[in-house]
Image: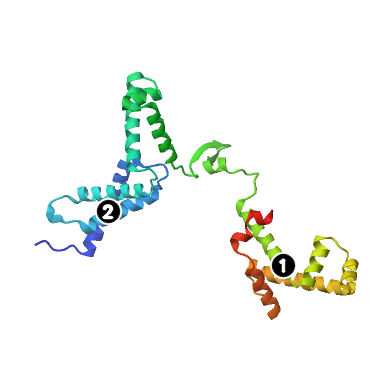
Amino acid sequence: MTAEPTTGDIAALIEAHLPLVRQVLAGVAGHFPRHADREELAQAARLGLVEAAHRYDASRGVPFERWAAVRIRGAILDSVRAVDFAPRTLRSAMRVADAARCELEGELNRTPTAGERADRMGVSLRELTCLEGKAHRALVISLDAGVDRSEDEPRTLASTIVDPHQPNPLTLLEDLERSSYVGDALLSLPERLRDVVTSYFLDGEASSSIAARLGVTESRVSQMRSEALAMLRSALAAVYADEPVDGGSRDRAFAAEVAGRSTFAARVSLSRSA
């Protein structure tokens, strides 16, 4: 009766056959879809080797290299299928189309027309066009893929899509959220303080006019304005910069009201800023 392999035996088996992982990867590399991450596939291959070492039974007479190669290849293909958006039937049909194209190129010494390829496959031109359309929609291209070089600097697909003259989307979101917090804070101010702030800063009303309308002195208007600004700064620092509120219970209650006045989705809504 064959003794069960120890943990040390399994670890030694794995370490001795790590080069097999690279060999199997190289053998199936041509079948990788463009969007498949090579490091993830290599990791899947290594896990396949580990699984093979744990499940290997020497008593069956199968060399470990052959057993492990099958398990490694299977692990790689499973990983590829997991990130493939196209069903197997579509991939199979595209292999038939590629084979027909290669055959015709060899026979005609030129690129075959779509009609010639459809005839060789035994399908209508419309069916071939539909097949290629499905394959195109299932194609995934990495945004980090290189496209060309400009002034000796590599360019990626993402660099050709993003307009450098347009504002950064993250900056836009931050600006929307910040302005929404300011609006919520203004709405949460006590009525007379809100009146002073909006009249002075937004409407451009003079302090003397505000004082006469509210029946107070200009000095009192200045005090109210300073009081409102202090409340706004403290509340905005608390909800936007996550800083503690410096003040009494009124300031903490005010900051809590500002924080709960709207949701994140509402704050960054373009319709709200319109």
Secondary structure of the residue carrying numbered label 2: helix
Density class for disc 1 (Cα within 10 Å; few <14, some 14-19, many ≥20) is some
x, y percent for residue 124: 36, 27
- Left or right of 259: which side holds 57? left
x, y percent for residue 88: 33, 42
**How far apart in space, not on screen, are marks 1 and 2 (Cα)?**
63 Å
Whether 198 is drawn above or below 26: the answer is below
The N terminus, quarter of image? bottom left
Which residue occupies 34% across, 39% down? 91
x, y percent for residue 192: 80, 72
Disc 1 or 2, which lies upstream in sequence? 2
Choose top left, top right, bottom left or bottom right for residue 215. Answer: bottom right
**Along the viewing direction, whichever of 205 and 27 lies nearer the viewer:** 205
- Left or right of 215: which side holds 229? left
Q: Which amino acid does label 1 sit on?
A: Leu
Secondary structure of the residue carrying numbered label 1: helix
Q: Is residue 20 visible?
A: no
x, y percent for residue 143: 50, 44
User: Where does label 2 land, which residue?
Assistant: 49
Whether 153 is drawn above or below 13: the answer is above
Which residue occupies 34% across, 47% down? 81
User: Where does label 1 land, which residue?
Assistant: 187
Which residue occupies 60% across, 64% down? 263
